[in-house]
Structures are given as C-alpha cells and as structure tokens.
Amino acid sequence: MTDNRQFATAPASRSRDHDAGSSPLIDVQNLDHAYGEGELKKQVLFDNCLTVHPGEIVIMTGPSGSGKTTLLTLIGTLRRVQEGSVKVVGQELRGASNRQLLKLRRELGFIFQAHNLFESLTAYQNVKMAMELFDFSKAEMHERITSILTRLGLGDRIHYKPDSLSGGQKQRVAIARGLAHSPKLILADEPTAALDKDSGREVVTIFQEMAKEQGCSILMVTHDNRILDVADRIVNMVDGYVRSDVVVEESSVICEFLKRCAAFGDLTPRTLTAVADQMEKVVIPAGQTVITQGEAGDNFYLIRDGSVDVSQVVDGSQKKVAELVTGDFFGEAALMTGDPRNATVVTKQDTVLYALDKEEFQAALSTSDSFEQELRKALFERQ
C-alpha cells in the first residue's frame, strides 16, 4: 500500500481555496502560552495553529476557560507571544518592537466584552477619539462616525454620554469605535452578547459587508448561536487546544455525502457534523494506490472529487470490479470486520478524498445501535 504520508493532506476545515498569492491576515503556528512563573506557572494554550485569510469570518467557540480570549488577545498584540509564531497582517509578533506593534494596531479593530468607554465623552466623541489616530479629514470622520452610529440604532443617542445609555447601547458604541476606520482585521470578543436580536443581526450584517467588499477578516469569540450562520469557519477550543477548525460550507458538503452512505444515514446532524469535522483531506495523484487487497485497514475514505478503480485478485489475476466517483466511499468493510482489505483501490485521475481514521470511525460506530446495524446491513448487501 502506498504510504499516505506522501500525499498532500490537510484537515477538512482547511480545504477552502484562496486566491493565488493570498497571504493569511492571521497565521498562528505552534503557539503555547502560560500565566505565572515557577511553581505558579500554568499553561493555558498548547501547540495551537490557526490561519485566517482576507475576507473570512471565523467564529471561535468553546467552554469558558478554554483559551479563546487568551488566543484573541495574543493575536491582538495585547499580550506578548512566548512560544511559537503569530503573524498578523504580515508582522511577526514574537520579538516585535513596541514601534512595530503600535503600527500594526492601526490595522486592527478591537471589540471586547468590556466596552471601556470614556464616561466623560459622548458616543460620538468616544468613536472620534479612536478615529483621530488615522488620517481622515474632519468631514470624512464626521460622516463615518454619524453613519455607523446611526446604522447601529444610535442615531438619536449620538451625543449621549455612557451614563445615559443602556448596556446594549454602550456595546454598540464600542462596536462603532472598532469599525469606523475600516480595519483590515476585526477581533471581537462576544460582540453581540449584550444586544437584542435585531441589533445583533445588524452588527453581523456589517461584518459580512466589510468582509465581502473590503476583504476585511473577522475573528470573533461568541456563544451566540443566533449568528453562527455568518461564519465561513467555526473553530472550537477545548482545554487550550484548537480541537476542530471547520469550513462550514465544506463540512455541509461532506455531511451530504456521508448521508448517502447507509451506514451514516441515521446519524443525527450533530453526530454527522462531528464525524465530518474529524475527516482529513487527502489529495492523491493519478495512478496511485490508495489501499491494497490483503493489507490491514486503517482508514475509511469518501471521494470529494475524482474517481478510482476497484479491483480484486480473482483466480490469480487482478480484475476490475467497480469504478467509484465523487460522493462514493470505500474502506469501511475492513474497519468494521477487522478482516484484511478485500480489494485494491487505485486513483484514475488526481483525486481528492476525505479520510476518517480507524479510531474515529469506531468512535462513530459506537454512537448508536442504528449506526452499527445499518453498517452491517450495508456490508451484507455488498457481498
């Protein structure tokens, strides 16, 4: 069997294609972080990797204390990078000078849970104070501030001070402050948590417009299920690790393919999505052997694009028994029965597969009795 490590592999979540030459606005590699020193030192981030490209909206989810905000503040230059690499808008943060960090911050828009408004300034003045860091004319500055505050439902509160605003209104001022200068990258921590449904939807609509029209990237920590639909990718963090990083559109495609397989057809959408999240993208050149008859099984495969020939040794000679194309699958029999592979599979052209390893396959198998029953039925019908 050809060693799959020679193939180009990537998580399903990272399969989205970007424009040639497009560099990520965020590129995190092997990032660790700890608080305290000596016996009090506690590591909170472990070997994390994350990329965000221009125009992407990426949502980070996960339980409280999982490291989401720490990761966000490291990317936002509010903490110093200790181990690993963090590049933001092309600038390496580890070892960067204060001058370099100050220059970079002008490219960022910050929206955090604590709105941190100046109590002595009006909503207009709070936004203007941030705008004065940039080279806008007075007329353009006034137009931008008035427009964004009005759009966020504060047209009649522009000249109100924070003590005359509700919590949700204060949050909208903070959002306006982070967006008014049209940053290249927006970092947001629970930006809609204090907002009602309509206000929250308006905020994410603005995010979508900025991503589409300006190529702005948005990295957002949220527990707000009302806005998950805007995400291009959803990153889940658990105990300091990025556990999954899912391209929403691609995950949906994989789930649709999996549902065609009788073995997966009865799984709930939640379980199907969890299975899809674990699958690895494998790009295999034409003429390569994916699995070999007689060898032990280690992966279940789903064909995303391309085709393969399936052959078996019959009376001492290799005989083609099937051709599989986009949406078809193979490799589950050996994982289910523990028997050696019963066929050889060779790519007919450059082929994109999604692979689920034996451990994850068996974890899915254990999720419900119906899964195992359907899989056994599917295997029986293939005999």
Image: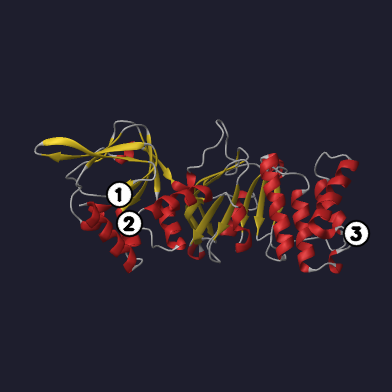
Dot 2 or dot 1, earlier in sequence: 1
Q: Which residue is mark 3?
A: 159
Q: Secondary structure at mark 3?
A: loop
Labelled pair 2, 3 in contact (Cβ < 8 Å): no
Residue 299's label in the rendered image is 1
- Examine the image and state in which quarter residue 295 appears: top left
Mark 2: few/some/many CA within 10 Å (<14, 14-19, 20+):
many
Asked if marks 2 and 1 touch (Cβ < 8 Å), the reply is yes
Which residue is farthest left? Answer: 315
Three-letter amino acid code at the position of disc 3: His
Query: 174 left or right of 73?
Result: right
Which corner quadrant holds the N terminus? Answer: top left
Q: Is residue 155 above or below residue 311?
A: below
Residue reaching furthest to the front = 381
Q: How is the image coloured?
A: secondary structure
Residue 83 in sight here = no
Residue 300 visible in the current orientation: yes
Which of the 4 quarters of the picture holds residue 104? top right
- Label 1 sits on what residue type? Asn
Local secondary structure at mark 1: strand
